[in-house]
Image (spheres, grey):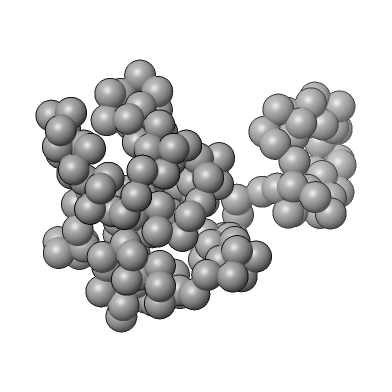
Amino acid sequence: MSEKNTNDLKEVLGRTHLSEFDKYCNENKDSMNNDEDSFSIYIKDLLANKGITQQSVFLNADIPERYGYKLLSGEKHTKQRDVILRICYAAELSLNETQRALKKYEMPELYPKIPRDALMMIIFNERPGSILDVNALLKKNGMEPLRTSGLQD
């Protein structure tokens, strides 16, 4: 089965009767966010497809390795979207893949009307270098750099 986008699912729901709800869930389980491990599975699958190790992601994201493994296993959870953005950037995720990862982690997607988010969207599209380069760009534009995982809440 392939993953359907939200508009496709809305269209299917428009034709779905209450009695067919179980069938809908079963036929579209690959597209639904009801699995608490969905972020972990999604990131690990992308890394495997790209041939990137988790260790290199944590190193490039400047995140302590033990903490990174706990985040990806679901053992730890962060409320800091910047930590997830660091992981996504270091994992070489595209903007679309990053938006999907944020959604799966139940965090707000990057939003084009918020200046810092807009700049991050451009950064994900253009890939200007390392996390240090990203933070330098953010600072240059008068914005807060991506937080480190120092405050692990």
Task: Locate residue 61 relative to residue 11 in the image: left or right.
Answer: left
Which residue is nearer to you in this view: 133 or 65? Answer: 133
Q: Position of residue 32 (x, y in %)?
A: 66, 48
Q: How many marks?
A: 0
Looking at the image, the residue that sits furthest to the top is: 113
Q: Where's the C terminus, which quadrant? A: bottom left
Looking at the image, the residue that sits furthest to the bottom is: 66
Which residue is nearer to you in this view: 16 or 74? Answer: 74
Decide if residue 74 is in sight here: no
Task: Locate residue 15 relative to residue 59 in the image: left or right.
Answer: right
- Residue at the spot x=28%, y=23% of the render? 115
- Residue at the spot x=35%, y=70% of the render? 58
Residue 92's place in the image compared with 55, above or below, is above
Q: Position of residue 26 (x, y in %)?
A: 81, 54
Which residue is nearer to you in this view: 33 or 126? Answer: 126
- Residue at the spot x=21%, y=45% of the render? 135
Q: Where's the N terminus, which quadrant? A: bottom right
Q: Position of residue 52 (x, y in %)?
A: 52, 70
Q: Position of residue 14 (x, y in %)?
A: 80, 24
Task: Locate residue 59 relative to residue 47 in the image: left or right.
Answer: left
Residue 113's place in the image compared with 125, above or below, is above
Decide if residue 8 is in sight here: yes
Q: Give residue 49's quadrant in the image.
A: bottom right
- Residue at the spot x=52%, y=66% of the render? 40
Residue 127's place in the image compared with 59, above or below, is above
Looking at the image, the residue that sits furthest to the front is: 129
